[in-house]
Amino acid sequence: MSDITVAIVGRANVGKSTLFNKICGERVSIVEDTPGVTRDRVYYETEWNGKSITLIDTGGFEPKIDEPMYVKMRDQIYIAIETADVIVFLCDVTAGLTPDDRDIGQMLKKSKKPVIVTVNKVDSVGQKPLAYYEFYELGFDNDPIAVSSISGTGTGDLLDEIVNLAPEKEPEEDYGDAIKVAVIGKPNTGKSSLVNRVLGEDRMIVSDVAGTTRDAVNSKLSNEFGNYVIIDTAGMRRQAKVEDRIEKFSVLRAKSAVENADVCLVMIDGNAGVTEQDVKIAGIAHEAGKGSIIVVNKWDIVEKDDSTTRKFSAILKDALSFMDYAPIQFISAKTGQRVDKLFPMINTVAKNCSNRITTGTLNDVLNEAVTRVQPPTDRGKRLKIYYMTQTGANPPTFVIFCNNAELFHFSYQRYIENKLREVFGFEGTPIKLIIRERGDDVK
């Protein structure tokens, strides 16, 4: 999770995407002279003065146009504002202070977030143009910052001010031996309903509006199975309704929750089936090396026959083939059906993630595996495997030394991984194999 989240907000065609790309150092956002090109939020992570910064580029804010596209763009901007620690309010010096700028300024004051009025297209060096001083009328506490998003002039001052105004974040609480469980998934899969069910209270706001929850909230839980910290992304948006159709916000929330978790519950809406967004969010947990359980929710309202569960499991295994180690549990957060079965699974997965195997035992398994299936050859050269050792946990990480790393094909690595799972279990956790040629340093 980055130290500072920054939203760039302003009217259409003031240069938001150009400034975003200049700070990022690459062409991340589309830049055209057509208002409304950036309709959705775009994210990028960068760093300044030792602080990691997540930048959010937004579409042009049109306060008075009620066409459906502009309404959706405003929804995206509201999400970005509420996500942000600091807001960069970008204006255009060549257009001067407009009535829309004033309306946007009033809206941003209501957010109670630090706002930096940033006057773009100040392309000449030296004396600022007279139009720059009009932006003091917006009434924010700090002096406007003049920038040129094309040349990059003033962007260093802007980044300095962002770091200066960003609120200090609370240090992470020490939860001792509690297992930290992230509940992740696309909007409206029932994440908050599950959290409420396991906590036994309406801790999270539940709504049919996709994306009702916002910031990561940690809730302690002790029950007959152990001690847990449930990480959900709770917090009501000020807007009564927000349609987040592209669901990029859910990916940002998932990344934040996953980073702080020991085990991830990947929530799937059983009534809606498996979507591309589900796969993307599950991939975040996999790439982070976190233990995972696939939780299929709303199973109480799915029309079933004697093969429905088996067929849905097969679809899941196919769509999430990279996560075939993850167990699947079908639940109803609404009725509580099979929710209590999650905790023994969480305990098992957490234990498997932190499991350590002695080098001697590992090499016994390795030798048996190599004897059963000979290592591959290529152009008369045979792969020779010398030994294996575990160098880390969470996820279990193993280094295998051999004579030629190029000969150690993916299929044979998969075979060795399957052998480790067959002997040691490792249900629910990814396994990381690092191939080294003898003489290489172990890192």
Image: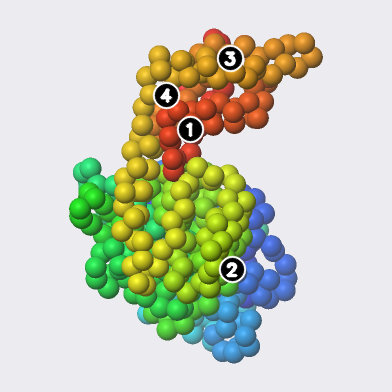
Q: Amino acid at mark 3?
A: Thr
- Residue furthest out toward the front: 306
Circles 3 and 1 in contact, beta carbons < 8 Å: no
Q: What residue is at 31 percent from the left and 45 percent from the top?
A: 347
Q: Nearer the viewer, residue 336 or 248?
A: 336
Q: What residue is at 63 percent from the left and 88 percent from the top?
A: 67
Circles 4 and 3 in contact, beta carbons < 8 Å: no
Q: Which residue is mark 1?
A: 421
- Disc 1 to disc 4, how far (Cα)? 17 Å
Q: Nearer the viewer, residue 176 or 99?
A: 176
Circles 2 and 3 in contact, beta carbons < 8 Å: no
x and y, in percent, of residue 146 in the image: 53, 64
Query: SS at mark 4?
Result: strand
The numbered disc on residue 246 is 2
**Mark 3 or mark 1, which has the lower sequence index?**
3
Q: Amino acid at mark 1?
A: Arg
x and y, in percent, of residue 215 in the image: 37, 64
Q: Quadrant of residue 107?
A: bottom left
The numbered disc on residue 371 is 3
- When the figure is inspected, residue 149 is found, relative to residue 432, above or below; the finding is below
Query: SS at mark 1?
Result: helix
Q: Nearer the viewer, residue 248 or 209?
A: 209
Query: SS at mark 2?
Result: loop
- Disc 4 to disc 3, how far (Cα)? 24 Å
- When the figure is inspected, residue 146 is found, relative to residue 52, above or below; the finding is below
- Disc 1 to disc 2, how far (Cα)? 37 Å
